Each structure stands twice: as C-alpha cells, then as structure tokens.
Image (cartoon, rainbow, N blue to C red):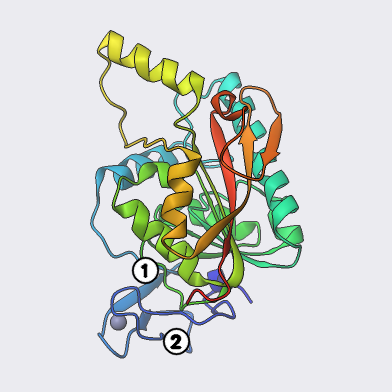
Amino acid sequence: MSAGLGAPLAVTHRCPRCHAVLTWPASAQGAITCEACHAAFPLIDGIPSFELSGHDRVRAFFSEVASRSLGSNIAYIPEPESPAFKRQAHVYAAAVARVLGRWVPYGTLVLDVGCGHGMLREFATSHYRMAGIDFVFRMLPSARAQGYAVYHGEATALPFADNQFGAALCTEILNQYEDPAAEVLLGELSRICVPNGLVILSTMNRASALRLLVRFARRLSGQAPMDVPQVSRTCRSVVAIAERHGLLLSEAAWLLSPTRALTFSQSCSTVVAPLATNYFVCLRKRSDAS
Ligand SMILES: [Zn+2]
C-alpha cells in the first residue's frame, strides 16, 4: 500500500506537533486529526501534509526552483540548465545509488529525507521499500509515480514514531541547515531508525581544496552570498554531531568531483579528503540508543 494513495505506510505515525500517535482516517479524503492536540493535517491529492512552519527563505527558494524544474532528476537546477550541470547531477545520482547499494541491504525500508523528485529513480524502488518526505509539495507526485510512499513535511519534525525505518537517506540537505538546526536534523534521522539501523548522509566537504578556492574567490570579488545557506562541514564535524545522537561512523565515501571516482575510508582521516567536493557517511545507530 502506498501512503501516496491515502493509505498509510506500515509504520507508526506520530503527530509532528505534540508527538502523540496518529490514527489514519478511514477515507483517503479529508484530514488526519491528532486526537491529543487536535491539529489537522490535510491529505492533498492523497498526499499527507505535515507542514508545520512558515515560509522561510530556503523553502521559498526551493519551491521556486521546483516550479521550473519539473521532470528533472533533482530540485536544484540553476537556469539555464547547462550540459555540465546535468552531467554532474547524473554523476551525483550514480554515486548515491552506489553507496546505498554498498551500505544498505536490499529490501530495507528506507526513508529518503528531502526526496525531491526521487533522484534515484528505479534503482531505489526496485531494490528498497522507499518512503520520501520533502517540504516542496510539487515535487512529490513525481516521486510517488516512481513508487515512493510520499509525505509532505519537515526534515526536522518527521511524522513517524521512534524506531520505524531500517535506514534514512539524506543527501545534500544538511548543508541547508545552520547550527543548531543541524543537531535537530541528525536527532530526527537517528530517532526514526531502528537500533542498528543506518543513516546515510551526504554533504558539502569543508575540507575540499576546490571549495576553499571558490570561497576565497568569492570573498576577493566581493560577491553576494548565495540565495540559501550553503553550510559546508568537515567529515569530522558531522560525525561529532552524529555521535551526540547515538550514530557511529561505519564508513565514509569521497566523491572526487568532477570525476566519477568514489573512494572509501574507515575514518574521516584520509589523504583524498581535500580532493572531494562532497562526501557520504554511513552512520550506524547504536543498539542501545533509544
Ligand atoms: Zn498532536
């Protein structure tokens, strides 16, 4: 059954506002009402909407980008859509598929947090049971058409009870969050995973020599800041946040962009770190973490 059709995914849902368990309505129409706090969450075209917060600049930016990139693989397509950028998006999607296949056993129930249009396409839905959540509603029908159970909502207030998913996937989302929101995000990713479950996270590498050059050039030229926060972090700093939420580094993967090469390391310390624009970490939830 698909949550996108109004029937819930076989997990326990919780109210993102008061954290009480939610009961799904008998009808695919109408709203899911929290019996504890009486918040009503509408089903829009059969997609449950758990949006809580107002419209900040990140949300406004991605909503606007999504409005001109329907049908694209990813949300963040600058105009004009250059062949070089398309190639990079393809390389990136291939890297995500590779690390997912390496780290997460097939058949696992995976929540893609910030799923967008469903970048992984049939790779994801043919190997995993996929659910996705994004705050940009207009991208969700595309992910649903690929077989994702989709939810409209917040990465920092997930509408699921604790210990529900075998894995959480969160690609290039952390970089939109400044501290302390990053702590909340990691806490949520850990919370919804079962003990020993996996959080697969990718983000922009602060230690990248290329990113260092770009930051330096922007500063020299006096360029205005980006439209949205772009917070790059070192692998070590991400792992430090993760550890505070019961997540331990299992392996890291380094994307040696603009090549397609992906190299793996057991720790954040590796000689290739300055060559990687982005990296992935596979974090395992401690078995004693609640
Ligand atoms: Zn409630």
Q: Amino acid at mark 2?
A: Pro
**Vertical position of residue 233 compared to residue 20: above or below:** above
Q: Residue 159 got which mark?
A: none
Quadrant hosting residue 154: bottom left
Q: Residue 50 got which mark?
A: 1
Q: Nearer the viewer, mark 1 or mark 2?
A: 1
Quadrant observed for ligand 1 in the rendered image: bottom left
Question: Residue at left 50%, top 73%?
Answer: 289
Residue in the foreground of this view, choosing between 13 and 253: 253
Q: Is residue 257 visible?
A: yes
Q: CA distance from mark 1 to mark 2?
A: 15 Å
Question: Residue at left 26%, top 60%?
Answer: 53
Image coordinates for residue 223, horizontal then vertical, percent: 28, 16
Question: For numbered disc 2, what is the local secondary structure?
Answer: loop
Question: Residue at left 60%, top 44%?
Answer: 267
**Vertical position of residue 227 compared to residue 32: above or below:** above
Residue in the foreground of this view, choosing between 170 and 66: 170
Image coordinates for residue 181, horizontal then vertical, percent: 31, 53
Image coordinates for residue 165, horizontal then vertical, percent: 58, 71
Question: For numbered disc 1, what is the local secondary structure?
Answer: loop
Dot 1, crowdedness within 10 Å: few (<14), some or many (≥20)? many
Image coordinates for residue 145, horizontal then vertical, percent: 62, 58
Q: Does residue 2 appear to the left or right of 80 in the view shown?
A: right
Q: Which residue is mark 2?
A: 25
Q: Is residue 152 visible?
A: no
